[in-house]
Image (cartoon, rainbow, N blue to C red):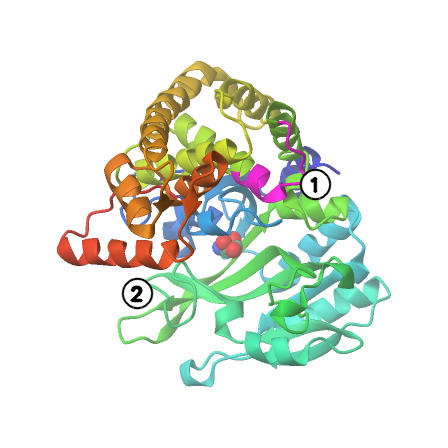
Amino acid sequence: MDAHDIRSSFLQFQRDRGHAQITRASLTPKHDPSTLFTGSGMQALLPYLLGQEHPDGHRLVDSQPCLRAQDIENVGDNRHTTFFEMLGNWSLGDYFKEQQIRWFFEFLVDVVGLDPARISVTCFIGDAEHGIPRDDEAASIWQRVFAEKGIEAGIASIGSQADGDARGVREGERIFFYDSTENWWSRGGDLFTTPLGDPCGPDSEVFYDFGPDHHDPAFGLAHPASDSGKFMEIGNQVFMQYRRELDGSFTPLEQRNVDFGGGLERIAAASLGTPDVYRISLLAPIVETLERLSGTSYADDPHSLRIIADHLRGAVFLASDGVRPSNKEQGYVMRRLLRRAIRTAYGIGLRDSFFGAVVDQIAGLYEDAFPELADRRDEILEVLLREEASFRRTLQAGLKALRGFEGRTLTGADVFLLSDTHGFPRELSVEEAERLGIAVDADWELEYDSALQAQRERSRGSSRLQVAEPS
Ligand code: SER
């Protein structure tokens, strides 16, 4: 199944089970000052998880576009993207653990066709201090559904991620108990960082095992919660049944809810049998277009091509949502995405304007699910081209200044000056200097950092978000 089929099958699967398909929320929440972007499907459903009646009933489904700006720096590996789609279903005081676990497992195995032997799951180990029990109920449901596929699922109490890195997985283990840093969900993350008044609860996450060839030993031994590459999380079922109170305690909600979210891109990657989400049908064509335009093959420089593909896709969705590049809030993130994409493109020899082809490609890939991209194609392209033109002027001014260093050694202080006065990105100064045959001081980074630090100290007190150097 490709990503497109997985999205439509999921929505159909849940509609068949009595879920109303709700209109997805905007990528940039209009009435929630606490967050810049929609980062999960439940965000727009907070009042209903806390008990307000939803006009569409107690069972809801959608595929929610999300953006996680905190992942910008991680983009470049095979699994992180800033923009992604989250398949979601919710029970608002209706079904609970048994139904949710059964249905998601059935969807993955019988609809998408994943091998159940490659699926592992995690459950909450409990928290005595807050009186929250270990989720043995979820674990025994999992044992039953695996048994129905002829798989005996052993249970391991791993506790923390560090324990797992040292201990790894033992023969027959498939269900893992972790603490609240892994198996607790709220908008704030951990049990202790749950925002006051927010709904929250233990969760049970589902992982796909790509096999030992994908394990990076730098992360210790492989286990579901590690980032070693062998296991990838493809879905999270939150049993939202508590609310965080002022005194730090958790009181049970009147209704027990399910909040399920699964990354479409990741489920599609598991379905293809590759841990590289950039190979899926929503991203591979963008990468191929970039390969063709730049003459750089994915095999030679996956990191750069992933950054450009991800960042442009995110920027296209933001532009379609009405965001414009600027120096603050959502616009700042959009500017960072675009400038990082352009700078990375520059690094692989993509120096002429290439946005037109990529925007058309993205609009085409999302023709069915997001027809607004094609409808707003000209407007989106204009926004992107304007930012591109302005950043190119910056780049050209920086390059001109850089040529003034010919015959000398470029120091960290010079690199800082180029960035500070021309907005010329530091990595680009160094890359371009090398290309022009200008020597670069071996300690340039140290010197750059101390110049930056000195400047920060001079301007302490001004904490406004600035675009001194989009990275
Ligand atoms: N809220 C949970 C998540 O974002 C599940 O939807 O992972």
Q: Is residue 337 magenta?
A: no
Q: Read off the residue under disc 2.
A: 196
Residue at 49% across, 36% down: 435
SS under mark 1: loop
The stretch drawn in magenta includes residue 306: yes
Mark 2 belongs to which amino acid?
Leu
- The numbered mark at residue 173 is none
* Magenta stretch, residue numbers: 295-307
**Does residue 467 appear in this view?**
no
Which residue is most to the bottom? 128
Side (left or right) of 345 relative to 78 = left
Q: Compared to 184, does 303 lie above or below?
A: above
Residue with the mark numbered 1 = 299
Q: Nearer the viewer, mark 2 or mark 1?
A: 1
Please report the residue visible at 75 percent of the width from the left and 38 percent of the height from the top.
Answer: 1
Residue 285 position in % (x across, y down) = 65, 29
